[in-house]
Image (cartoon, rainbow, N blue to C red):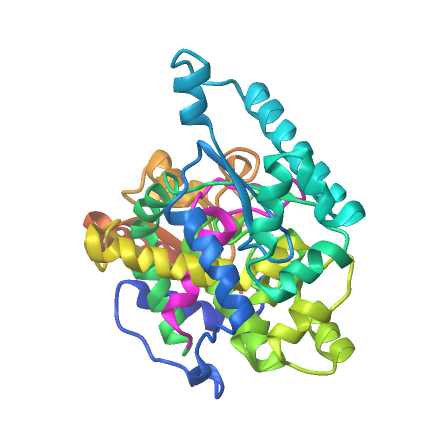
Amino acid sequence: MIMRPAFLKSLLLLATLVGNGLAQARPAVAEQGFPATPMVKRQAEFWVKVFQRYDSSTILIHDPEFVDLIIDVVDFKQFRDKYNQGKSFSRAERRDITNRYLERYQLAINRMQKMGKKALEYGPMEQRVLQVYSKRKETLARLFTEEIILRTQQGMADEFPKAAERAENYLPYMERIFQNRGLPIELTRIAFVESMFNRQALSKVGASGIWQFMPDTARSFMTVNSHVDERLSPLKASYGASLLLSQNLSLLKSWPLAITAYNHGPSGMARAVKQVGTRDFDQILQRYNSPSFGFASRNFYSEFLAARQVYKDLKKKQISENKNPMRIDRVRLDVPISIQQIVTHTPLKEETLSSYNHCLLPKAFTSYRNRPLPKGFEIIVPQEIATSVRRSINELQYSLSKKSRTKI
């Protein structure tokens, strides 16, 4: 992919990861912050529990529309100690037990909808369903008037701290990228929702990296081809995410809509505003009807709010700040240079180049090792050798430019 000059100019901002940079104009509506309407607040409280209270040994059975309505919690640690002689359940056994609970509660809901309170005679699960849905008038009305298909959610309280530890390697750089675009640095917490900061995350539909960019979307903001995939570079992908979120905000005028558009797409959220006739986020959550606006899209903003809060709580307790935790620097290529030339003429070894630049795919070191990386490409290098690498690159660039002028 040939990188556009305008994008190359923008990419220079990445240098501010470990140095100073010029902040761009702050979007006019950024000061609105991240509002939590009553519906969003209830959603976010559910996700805080998922991230903070319930670990991966638990499965929550809940209503998909009013997610805070938790019908039951299947705790496999208790089951293990009580029914399985302390032995862990296999994945298949966990799935079978969960499905039996889910089916029984689904039957209880169906009975309540058909028989009303007479269904309470069937047992404690019907009683539990009525107890949960009686908490609010709107949910009690839903129990008797709407089709309800219950959903399960695995807890993540043991995984979130691990994700937070991974995040500490990247967040200081990511936050500076967002800050220099005039964006709230807390937007970087979207990466928890997308991938839990798993650099190798790959979805079934092809989204990749900690920001889970799809290939076509990513190509508007970064290099994605057969030998370079900048989605796999947490820092370069973060710059792309900042551009995308800026565009979403300019189009949709509020952070709830702009953040949801990161999952559902800006055109999808624009259709939602047009269909419902308002930018009121609660109204869109309740009234927007689209096959693609499913559970993940409806909860994306509230998951972000929850991740933001849980990470903040963790940071207060145990996570230390370091502005350059990975001890890295970056060197910009002002002329196209191949990987072969880099490893031949600089102190960078191939192994180091590969381990610090995850966006360079295996093909970049084999069949494409003599193909120049594009002008403007930035190489991430260990901080301790950055000066010597930069000097070597500058000398190589001067030599290549001199040869080019001689040929002319």
Residue drawn at point x = 36 percent, y = 80 percent: 23
Q: Is residue 126 left or right of residue 351?
A: right
Find the magenta span and give its range.
Answer: 183-209
The answer to whether residue 9 is above or below residue 65 is below
Q: Where residue 63 sits: x, y (%)?
A: 62, 50
Q: Is residue 154 left or right of residue 290?
A: left
Name the quadrant containing residue 186. bottom left
Q: Where residue 123 sits: x, y (%)?
A: 63, 34
Q: Where residue 258 sits: x, y (%)?
A: 57, 72
Instruction: Give whichever of 80, 10 is nearer the camera.
Output: 80
Evaluate whether residue 154 shows in this view. Answer: yes
Residue drawn at point x = 67 percent, y = 72 percent: 284
The answer to whether residue 94 is above or below residue 373 is above
Most extreme residue toward the right is 114
Evaluate whether residue 334 shows in this view. Answer: no
- Is residue 189 a member of the stretch shown in magenta? yes
